[in-house]
Amino acid sequence: MNNKGFTLVELVMVTVIVAIVAFIVGDSLYMGIKGYLTAEDRVEAVEKGRAAMERIERETRNSILFSNAASNATILCFNDVYGKTTSFRYSGTQITRQEIAGGLGGCPGAGGNVLADDIAAFAFSYIQNSGVSNTTIYDSTRRIGITLTSTSDAESIELESEAYPVNVW
């Protein structure tokens, strides 16, 4: 008898082995791509949050007078060394910055330029000499804590920092 072909059992075995190898390779590729996309989302979330955080820190550090009435956990209002009144506000999913000329006769209202969007949480805390943290500013405030949670797709990154105003009190 002439055996020039493959039996059905041999073909089924080869098909099963090829399917197992394809599954292992495909799963490895999927996990690699998923890891890359997750890392990209994290980088984007950190970049957005860090840019806003650095701007708030820099301007707060150079402030000369804070508005006790207008500043709370989601709003910071202050005068800078150039006589402009600046506010940072958190509303919805955005952090905005607005500035007006003149003193603290009033804190700039809603609106302004968007510093960051896709912000899940944001808060100022006002830390006194004694180390006590409040959600409102007092004359004994020496540091301003800034906390924000930046998101991008399914990734969230929480950033925290403190600003030490050098020209205050």
Image: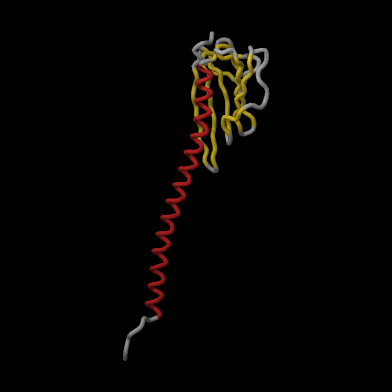
Q: How is the image coloured?
A: secondary structure
Is 61 displayed left or right of 71 in the figure? left
* Towards the viewer: 158 or 132: 158
* Towards the viewer: 110 or 82: 82
Which image quarter: residue 133? Answer: top right
The x, y position of residue 150, in whole percent, is 54, 34
* Residue under the image location 50 percent in, 27 percent down: 160
* Residue under the image location 60 percent in, 20 percent down: 76
Query: In the rendered image, which quarter contains the N terminus?
Result: bottom left
The x, y position of residue 69, in whole percent, is 65, 15
Is 113 displayed left or right of 27 in the figure? right
The x, y position of residue 138, in whole percent, is 59, 12
* Towards the viewer: 33 or 144: 33
Q: Residue furthest bottom?
A: 1
Query: In the rendered image, which quarter contains the C terminus?
Result: top right
Q: How many numbered discs?
A: 0
The x, y position of residue 152, in whole percent, is 54, 40
